[in-house]
Image (cartoon, rainbow, N blue to C red):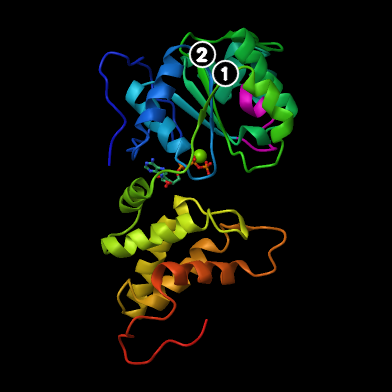
């Protein structure tokens, strides 16, 4: 396990803004991506982190923001993220009382980030409505935001925009790509090595025997290579499988490595996470069981209580 490098001297001090932002998250591996991201932000660039779900984009950015001691504003990108929600709005009651004045304006995440020189992180940026995207594009190009009746909010020099995108997410991607890509630097986040994924599981899930955990990670990684699977599971599937096995084993009063505990946990943790090819006529459960048997053997090792477990 490694932490984000801690170089004294580069921090840009500032207040922490609320949200999941400031939590310190140790990053496993990713030294190269951490270096690229820190350099890009230092150079003044806005950045898109592009990679499949669960590849540590949020974890990486939180750690970098924490290390640099910059405020961090987190926004979930979705179809409901209107310009008003992103920028902010005038409080109707205060406006009735005092009129349109700076103090009756409630800053949204973008105004907050611009004023405080924060890292504004928008997840799933390809899902936000076109008009909200246009606001962001303007801010990136001009470094300021014009709000009717409020005036101009100028970006503090430390303001940076970081977007996360998932290349498997078809929603809106084509529409957004050229406009965004022309204004940002791009860091690709692929899946990590098996060893790093095992370390992530150690961090996020209960303690289990190391060889068994390695097989869980092997199974999850195999979902990314299988011909009938279009999108495999991220390391989140391995984390959940270990957590679930632990809890099932406790209920059944058996060892966490018991064959059927693992199979049930694999099916529950992974069958919803994988996306099958259109041409695949089998169920996700069947495909997960096939992969489970490849990793853990096709029949239970000697059953502990005497009774062999029944069929699938
Ligand atoms: N390199 C890593 N170091 C530590 N934890 C990691 C790492 N990669 C993934 N994780 C863990 O895996 C899970 C998913 O990571 P994270 O939320 O950062 O992924 P993401 O790329 O932002 O996913 P999404 O695209 O779905 O938003 C989290 O529980 C996180 O703690
Ligand atoms: Mg994320």
**Does residue 152 appear left or right of residue 247 in this picture?**
right
Residue 197, x across and y down, in percent = 38, 49
Answer few, some or many: residues within 10 Å of disc 2's Cα (few below 14, many 20 plus, some between 14 and 19).
some
Which of 5 and 153 lies nearest the eye of the viewer? 5
**Does residue 257 appear left or right of residue 87 in this picture?**
left
Which of 89 and 152 lies nearest the eye of the viewer? 152
Q: Which residues are magenta?
A: 77-88
**Label 2 to label 1: alpha-carbon separation:** 6 Å
Answer few, some or many: residues within 10 Å of disc 1's Cα (few below 14, many 20 plus, some between 14 and 19).
many
Which of 306 and 193 lies nearest the eye of the viewer? 193
Q: Secondary structure at mark 2?
A: helix
Q: Secondary structure at mark 1?
A: helix
- 300, above or below 48, in the image: below
Residue at the disc numbered 2 = 115
Q: Are marks 2 and 1 in contact (CB under 8 Å)?
A: yes
Q: Could you tell me which residue is drawn at 65 percent across and 38 percent down?
A: 78
Q: How many marks?
A: 2
Name which quarter of the figure residue 239 lies in: bottom left
Residue 65, x across and y down, in percent = 39, 26
Q: Which mark is residue 281?
A: none
Q: Could you tell me which residue is drawn at 58 percent across and 72 percent down?
A: 286
- 38, above or below 269, in the image: above
Name which quarter of the figure residue 180 lies in: top right
List the single residue furthest toward the bottom.
306
Q: Could you tell me which residue is drawn at 39 percent across and 45 percent down?
A: 193
Residue at the disc numbered 1 = 111
**Does residue 141 appear left or right of residue 304 in this picture?**
right
Q: Is residue 186 magenta?
A: no
Whether residue 89 is visible, yes or no, is no
Task: Report whether the residue tagged 2 is closer than 8 Å to ligand 2.
Answer: no
């Amino acid at each position: 396990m490694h932490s984000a490098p801690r170089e004294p001297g580069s921090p840009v001090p500032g207040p922490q803004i609320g949200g999941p932002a400031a939590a310190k998250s140790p990053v496993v591996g990713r030294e190269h991506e951490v270096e690229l991201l820190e350099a890009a932000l230092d150079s003044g660039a806005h950045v898109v982190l592009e990679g499949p779900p669960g590849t540590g984009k949020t974890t990486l950015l939180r750690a970098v923001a924490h290390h640099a001691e910059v405020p961090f504003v987190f926004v979930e990108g979705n179809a409901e993220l209107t310009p008003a929600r992103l920028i902010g709005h005038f409080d109707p009651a205060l406006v009735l009382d005092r009129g349109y004045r700076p103090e009756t304006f409630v800053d949204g995440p973008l105004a907050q980030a611009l004023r405080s020189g924060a890292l504004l992180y928008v997840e799933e940026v390809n899902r936000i409505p076109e008009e909200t995207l246009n606001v962001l594009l303007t801010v990136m190009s001009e470094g300021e935001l014009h709000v009717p009746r409020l005036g101009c909010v100028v970006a503090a020099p430390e303001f940076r925009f970081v977007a996360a995108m998932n290349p498997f997410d078809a929603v809106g991607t084509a529409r957004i790509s050229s406009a965004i890509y022309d204004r940002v630097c791009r860091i690709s986040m692929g899946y990590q090595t098996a060893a790093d994924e095992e370390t992530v599981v150690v961090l996020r899930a209960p303690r289990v025997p190391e060889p068994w955990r390695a097989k869980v990670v092997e199974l999850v990684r195999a979902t990314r290579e299988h011909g009938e699977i279009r999108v495999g599971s991220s390391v989140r599937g391995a984390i959940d499988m270990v957590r679930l096995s632990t809890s099932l084993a406790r209920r059944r009063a058996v060892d966490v490595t018991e064959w059927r505990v693992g199979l049930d946990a694999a099916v529950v943790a992974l069958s919803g996470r994988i996306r099958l090819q259109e041409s695949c006529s089998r169920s996700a459960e069947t495909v997960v069981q096939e992969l489970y048997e490849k990793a853990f053997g096709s029949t239970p090792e000697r059953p502990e209580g005497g009774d062999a477990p029944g069929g699938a």
